[in-house]
Image (cartoon, rainbow, N blue to C red):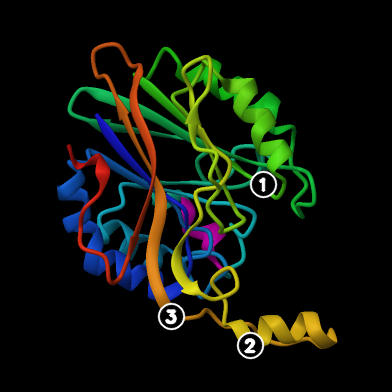
Amino acid sequence: MRILVLGDIVGRPARAFLKRRLEAYREKLRVDLVFANGENAAGGAGITAKTAEEIRQAGVDAITLGDHVWDQMGFDREIDQLDFVCRPANLPASNPGRDHLVLESGVFKVGLFTVLGRTFMGPKVSCPFEKADQLVERLTGETDALLAEIHAETTSEKESIGWHLDGRVNLVFGTHTHVPTADGRILKGGTAYQSDLGMTGPRESVLGREIEPCVGRFVDGLPRKCPVASGDVGLQGCLLEIDPDTGANRFFERIELREEDPVSTSAEC
């Protein structure tokens, strides 16, 4: 059982890249399921039903969201019809949308959920640790493997939840900061962990946005629009292999594919 998890999808260039490259990459890696964070998929902030369907058609089986979940007007009225999308689980229960997903590949069931961090983050959410505990307890008997996303600003909060869930889920992965971290590893309890998967989007950018206006905002402090960039587009994320008989992790590595790269990786063996 191989699962490919992609970092935040940023705007139209990222969606177009997935259309061009994901299917062949998925086949090359012999991937069973693909998950991605899509909270920046529509114009760089939020998502719509249309862009979510576009991402699914490109080969992504499930989409998680983050603090920009409601940025696109009307998405709160669309999300309940998207059975492959889940919102952050620790938003107020009155929010629409699913707080987790269960995906099937053959008879193998994979549970997936995301929680928002609380340090330097805008939305007012309940404790991500407590909510993660509740979902792990709820889903452990219903699934063969569990993946937990922490969409957060600080590495310390991400690492803390990684250790908190070690031995109880297959993977804890961080998103939100759009820059991949080099700390991907298997923790002592057997859980795979990476603080941030990076992004699926333009690397010739400032976190997916055009360079000049972003730099200008830091130089003189004047407000500027920062459109989604378009240079050096690619995907970043991780690949996890799970033993379908035991549910234990066999293999984990960080992955990256750029526009100019052939579809190959050390994980193809």
Q: Is residue 9 left or right of residue 156?
A: left
Nearer to us of marks 1 and 2 is: 2
Q: How many marks?
A: 3
Callout 2 amino acid: Glu
Nearer to us of marks 3 and 1 is: 3
Q: Does the magenta run of residues contain 78?
A: yes
Between 236 and 39, the one nearer to me in the picture: 236
Which class describes the residues within 10 Å of circle 1: few (<14), some (14-19), or many (20+)? many
Residue at the image position 35 percent from the left and 16 percent from the top: 248
Marks 2/3: CA distance? Answer: 13 Å
Magenta: main secondary structure equals helix
User: Which numbered disc, 2 or 3, marks the residue that appears first in the sequence?
Assistant: 2
Which class describes the residues within 10 Å of circle 2: few (<14), some (14-19), or many (20+)? few
**The N terminus, quarter of image:** top left
Q: Is residue 228 left or right of residue 242?
A: right
| Above or below, 201 relative to 56 | below
Provide the residue designation for mark 3.
231
Residue at the image position 74 percent from the left and 42 percent from the top: 125
User: Which numbered disc, 3 or 1, marks the residue that appears first in the sequence?
Assistant: 1
Marks 3/1: CA distance? Answer: 26 Å
The quadrant holding residue 235 is bottom left
Provide the residue designation for mark 1.
152
**Magenta span covers which residues?**
74-79
Helix, strand or loop at label 3? It is strand
| Above or below, 259 relative to 185 | below
Q: Is residue 222 left or right of residue 189?
A: right
- In the rendered image, residue 210, in percent from the top left (x then y), is placed at 57, 82
Provide the residue designation for mark 2.
212
Between 130 and 31, the one nearer to me in the picture: 31
Q: Does the magenta run of residues contain 42?
A: no
